Amino acid sequence: MIRHITVSYPSIDRDRGLDLFPIFLNFDFSKMIPRGVLAKIDLLTLGNIYETLDKVSNPKEIVYVLKSGLCFEKGFFLIDFEKFSKEMDRYLTLLKGFEHDCLYFEKNCYIDSELISKELNKIIFVTEFV
């Protein structure tokens, strides 16, 4: 099942972060650059995303980030949606390990959320940031 939600970023309530977990945001691991809302987060935090990932040796596939000041209470996962679309079976296998009933994915043009929901038997929240 797919559900579409819209979220304000940065959060209107600046005292608390967004409680969306687990959320997957788009990151290009081959070029080491953020895409989508992650680019906005990186810009608004003066390069905090890039600085954090620069310390990780050989990041690939899925990277968990938990750092204060990045708006997500429980952290977030970075994933390359373009690579995901090309290696769907491999990424579905990785995501099957998540024990949550639902997953949040940043709205993107690369992956078919309906197919992912069906394959994983989970609710997928397609999350659009405004």
Image (cartoon, rainbow, N blue to C red):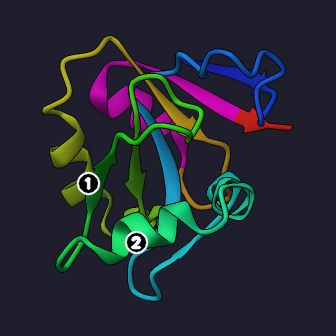
Closer to the N terminus: mark 1 or mark 2? 2
Name the residue located 53 percent from the left edge and 16 percent from the top edge: 19
Residue for point 68% across, 16% down = 15
- Name the amino acid, label 1: Tyr
Between 14 and 39, the residue placed more toward the observer is 14
| Secondary structure under the numbered disc 1 in the rendered image | helix
Identify the amino acid type marked 2: Lys
Q: What's the mark number on residue 83?
A: 2
Give the residue drawn at x 23%, y 71%: 56
Where is residue 11, by image quadrant?
top right
In this rendering, the answer to whether 45 lies above or below 120 is below
* In the displayed structure image, the side of residue 62 where residue 44 appears, left or right: right
User: Percent x, y for residue 7?
Assistant: 76, 25
- Give the percent coordinates (x, y) of residue 38: 62, 56
Given residues 10 and 121, the one toward you in this image is: 10
Residue 105 lies in the magenta stretch = no
Q: According to the image, label 1 marks what residue?
A: 91
Q: Residue 82: in sight, yes or no?
A: no
Seen from the viewer's position, the closer of residues 7 and 12 is 12
Q: Is residue 123 magenta?
A: yes
Q: Position of residue 85 (x, y in %)?
A: 44, 64
Looking at the image, the residue that sits furthest to the bottom is 31
**Residue contact between numbered discs 1 and 2, judged by CB atoms under 8 Å:** yes
Residue at figure coordinates x 39%, y 62% from the top left: 84
The crowd level at tag 2 (other Cα within 10 Å; few <14, some 14-19, many 20+) is some
What segment is highlighted magenta in the picture? 112-127
